[in-house]
Image: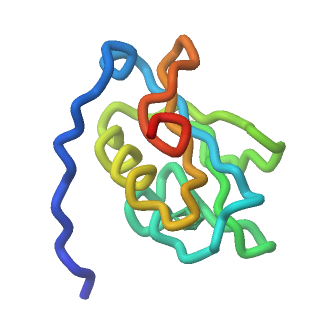
Amino acid sequence: MTEPRVAFAPSLPRSATGPLRVWVDQDLCTGDGLCVQYAPEVFEFDVDGLAYVKDGGGELLVAAGARAAVPDHLRLDVLDSAKECPGECIHVEGADGTAVAGPSHR
Ligand code: SF4
């Protein structure tokens, strides 16, 4: 049984109200799996034990810095993943590239 978690109520910049994209810096990923637990439709482990993002068809995007669109119904899960990621390596950005959550936003 998983622990209930409290969703953050982030104060988001204007760019966060539109479409969001997310990417993972695998150089910093600890492989703990928090993101995969929070948003398995967006994050998945590859055989190297590191987390990667997936496109809308579920295809793992393994190129460095590859961005995936964040489905509307998973915005909060992805934002929470970025905020709680122990590796500080999940980057969420608006359509204009502005950092919305993650290490570039802190
Ligand atoms: S939460 Fe961060 S450190 Fe943990 S597996 Fe996901 S990307 Fe890697």
* 11 vs 42, nearest the viewer: 11
Q: Quadrant of ligand 1?
A: bottom right
Q: Please determine whether, in this image, residue 94 is positioned above or below residue 23.
A: above
| Quadrant in which residue 52 is drawn | bottom right
Q: Quadrant of the C terminus?
A: top left
x and y percentages locating residue 72 in the rendered image: 34, 31
Residue 65 lies in quadrant: top right
Residue at image point 50% right, 28% down: 99
Q: Is residue 34 depicted above or below 3 in this figure?
A: above
Residue 87 position in % (x across, y down): 58, 63
The quarter of the rendered structure image containing the N terminus is: bottom left
Residue 46 as seen in the image, left or right of residue 44: right
**Residue 44: percent from the left, percent from the top?**
60, 62
Instruction: Give the image quarter of residue 45.
Output: bottom right
Q: Residue at x 30, y 38 (%)?
A: 73
Give above or below for 98 relative to 33.
above
Query: Which residue of the protein is positioned furthest toward the front in this rendering?
Result: 106
Residue under the point 73% across and 66% down: 46
Query: In the image, residue 37 lies at what x, y percent?
Result: 42, 68
Q: Is residue 85 left or right of residue 84?
A: right
